[in-house]
Each structure stands twice: as structure tokens, then as C-alpha cells.
């Protein structure tokens, strides 16, 4: 009887460990609304299988050696928009990826990363539902892209909780990027294509000239946001300092994709943060934001009200 109790206890511990081992909690959506009507597009089970396979690959994988409680998992959203199907089981589209972080002492959640991947091309067959992560080699386009974004999510999240804390995951994402680029993984993995792609995200984050961006991410999230409720005036001053740092980065590297994705994620948050600032701060922040992120100038005018 004693041995049986020990056995049951071991099974329980293993179950708890496995349940807490995975680090990501990613909501996955496969959108087929823009896909031209064809036989496969009408096969709802096929796309349900694809969605489940992507979900399982991201969420059931153990990406680190750290143990995460359920509430500690890194939240993210992945929406894959399928636009074309040039051949059976082959798809061309785009993907919207978000990483989300809680703010201490509040019910508020902040988006730490937001990016639209415009070169999301892959093949998937029903028999490939059990996708395998191979960190040292190229398996296929889909597993490479999912691995890349999973590791990137961890790198960015860890960076927001400790200064440069995500470095090891950033290097692993870089390794995935390099292998895919050298193995015919398609567009998005090289320096020769769109400046807003997977390669340039990793290049920017590993670039020593842009190291202050990653250091600033920690200060913005761990110091400013986590402490905003207790001292909003001091927090705003630190945000202005960070925005001035970003301005210096832009002067060094005008097309830095990390600047683009930061403002895509933070524009509404920044508008709300400075809604009760002093007139001088409002004008200063509006000038900085409209200069670095001109496409959202009209939205930023709300700060001046």
C-alpha cells in the first residue's frame, strides 16, 4: 500500500511538472475568409487540424529549462491570414503576432511586441499534424517560423523582466533564422528582402548600436509601467527619456524595424499615459512621437487635448 501511495505521488508530481513546463500560452487563429473558394478551402476539418497543429506546436513545446506556473506563462496571439493557395496544401498569406505582458499591481496587460509578417508562406498536409521542433536543422517553413516567433516571444518577455534577460532566446531565434535562410526557407529570412522582416528584427535586437533599445524595454516595463500607478509623474519623465533615446537610435539607423514594432505596440498606451501630463510634457512627447512615427501623427494629436 505504501509503494502504491508513493507511485501515485510520483505520478502527481510528474503531471504537475509537465503542466507547468510549457512557457507559452498562445491563442492561434487561422483566417480563411480571404482565401479563394476551392475544394480545400471548404474543408473545415483541414483548417481545424492546421489550427490545432500550430497551437500544439507552440503551446505544448518546452522551450526553456525554467518552470512556469500557469499564471506565469507568456501570453501571445497569432493570427494567420491565408490569402492564396497556389497548389494543394500550399499557402501564401501573412501573420499577425503579439506578445502580451501583465503590469504588476493592476489588471492591465500591455503589448510588448506587435508585428505583421507579410511573407508567411508554408505547406501543410493533414499527416503533418505532429510537427517536430528541430533546433539544429531545417524541417520545413512552418515549423521554422513558429519556432522563431516562439523564441522571440520569450526573448522579448524576459527582456522586460530583467535587463537583457532574453539574450539566450534571442540567440536561439537567430540560429533558427540562419538555418532557415541557408536551407531555402523562403522569404523573410535574409537581409536582401523587405527591411521589415524576420531577419531584420533579429539583426536589430542583436545590433550593439541598438542595445539601448533592449535596455530601455526593461526600464519601460519593469520600472515605468509596473510603478506607474504609484508615481505617474516620475514614470512619464522616464518615458520621455526613453523616447529621446529612441530618437538617437533613429538617427543612427533610420529603418530600424524595432522602432516600428515598438510604436505599433505602444502608440495607444503612450497616448493614454500622457493624457494627464503637463502641457510642456504633452508638447514634447507629441513632437517626439510624430517625428519618429509620422504615420500616426493624427492619432498622437489626442495627447495635446
Image (cartoon, rainbow, N blue to C red):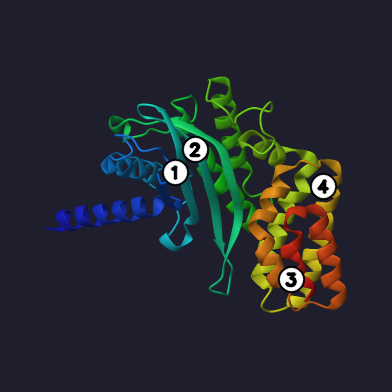
Q: Nearer the viewer, mark 2 or mark 4?
A: 2
Instruction: Characterize the local packing of mark 4: few (<14), some (14-19) or many (20 or more) Cα atoms within 10 angstroms.
Output: some
Residue underneath mark 2? 93
Q: Which mark is residue 34?
A: 1
Q: Quadrant of residue 194?
A: top right
Residue underneath mark 3? 302
Quadrant containing the C terminus is: bottom right
Question: Is residue 221 left or right of 150 when viewed as pictured?
Answer: right
Asked if the residues shown at circle 1 and circle 3 are in contact, with their CB atoms under 8 angstroms apart, the answer is no
Q: Nearer the viewer, mark 3 or mark 4?
A: 3
Instruction: Characterize the local packing of mark 1: few (<14), some (14-19) or many (20 or more) Cα atoms within 10 angstroms.
Output: few
Residue underneath mark 4? 249
Q: Earlier in the sequence, mark 2 or mark 4?
A: 2
Percent x, y for residue 137?
48, 24
Which residue is at a point 40% across and 44% down the rendered structure image?
Answer: 32
Q: Quadrant of residue 172?
A: top right
Q: Earlier in the sequence, mark 3 or mark 4?
A: 4
Quadrant containing the N terminus is: bottom left
Question: Is residue 86 left or right of 52 when viewed as pictured?
Answer: right
212 or 299: nearer the eye? Answer: 299
SS for tag 2?
Answer: strand
Q: Earlier in the sequence, mark 2 or mark 3?
A: 2
Q: Earlier in the sequence, mark 1 or mark 3?
A: 1
Amino acid at each position: 500500500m505504501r509503494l502504491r501511495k508513493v507511485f501515485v505521488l510520483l505520478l502527481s508530481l510528474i503531471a504537475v511538472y509537465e503542466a507547468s513546463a510549457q512557457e507559452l500560452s498562445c491563442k492561434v487563429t487561422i483566417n480563411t475568409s480571404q482565401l479563394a473558394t476551392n475544394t480545400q478551402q471548404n474543408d473545415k476539418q483541414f483548417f481545424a487540424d492546421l489550427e490545432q497543429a500550430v497551437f500544439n506546436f507552440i503551446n505544448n513545446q518546452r522551450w526553456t529549462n525554467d518552470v512556469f506556473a500557469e499564471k506565469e506563462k507568456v501570453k501571445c496571439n497569432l493570427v494567420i491570414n491565408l490569402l492564396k493557395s497556389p497548389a494543394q496544401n500550399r499557402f501564401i498569406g501573412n501573420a499577425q503576432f503579439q506578445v502580451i505582458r501583465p503590469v504588476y499591481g493592476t489588471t492591465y496587460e500591455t503589448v510588448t511586441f506587435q508585428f505583421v509578417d507579410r511573407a508567411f508562406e508554408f505547406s501543410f498536409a493533414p499527416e503533418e499534424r505532429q510537427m517536430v521542433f528541430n533546433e539544429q536543422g531545417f524541417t520545413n517553413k512552418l515549423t521554422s517560423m513558429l519556432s522563431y516567433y516562439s523564441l522571440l516571444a520569450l526573448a522579448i518577455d524576459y527582456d522586460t523582466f530583467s535587463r537583457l534577460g532574453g539574450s539566450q532566446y534571442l540567440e536561439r531565434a537567430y540560429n533558427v533564422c540562419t538555418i532557415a535562410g541557408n536551407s531555402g526557407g523562403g522569404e523573410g529570412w535574409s537581409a536582401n528582402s523587405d527591411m521589415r522582416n524576420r531577419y531584420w528584427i533579429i539583426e536589430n535586437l542583436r545590433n550593439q548600436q541598438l542595445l539601448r533599445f533592449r535596455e530601455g524595454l526593461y526600464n519601460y516595463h519593469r520600472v515605468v509601467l509596473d510603478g506607474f500607478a504609484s508615481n505617474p509623474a516620475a514614470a512619464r519623465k522616464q518615458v520621455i527619456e526613453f523616447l529621446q533615446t529612441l530618437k538617437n537610435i533613429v538617427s543612427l539607423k533610420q529603418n530600424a524595424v524595432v522602432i516600428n514594432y515598438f510604436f505599433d505596440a505602444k502608440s495607444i498606451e503612450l497616448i493614454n499615459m500622457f493624457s494627464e501630463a503637463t502641457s510642456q510634457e504633452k508638447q514634447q512627447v507629441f513632437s517626439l512621437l510624430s517625428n519618429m512615427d509620422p504615420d500616426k501623427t493624427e492619432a498622437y494629436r489626442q495627447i495635446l487635448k
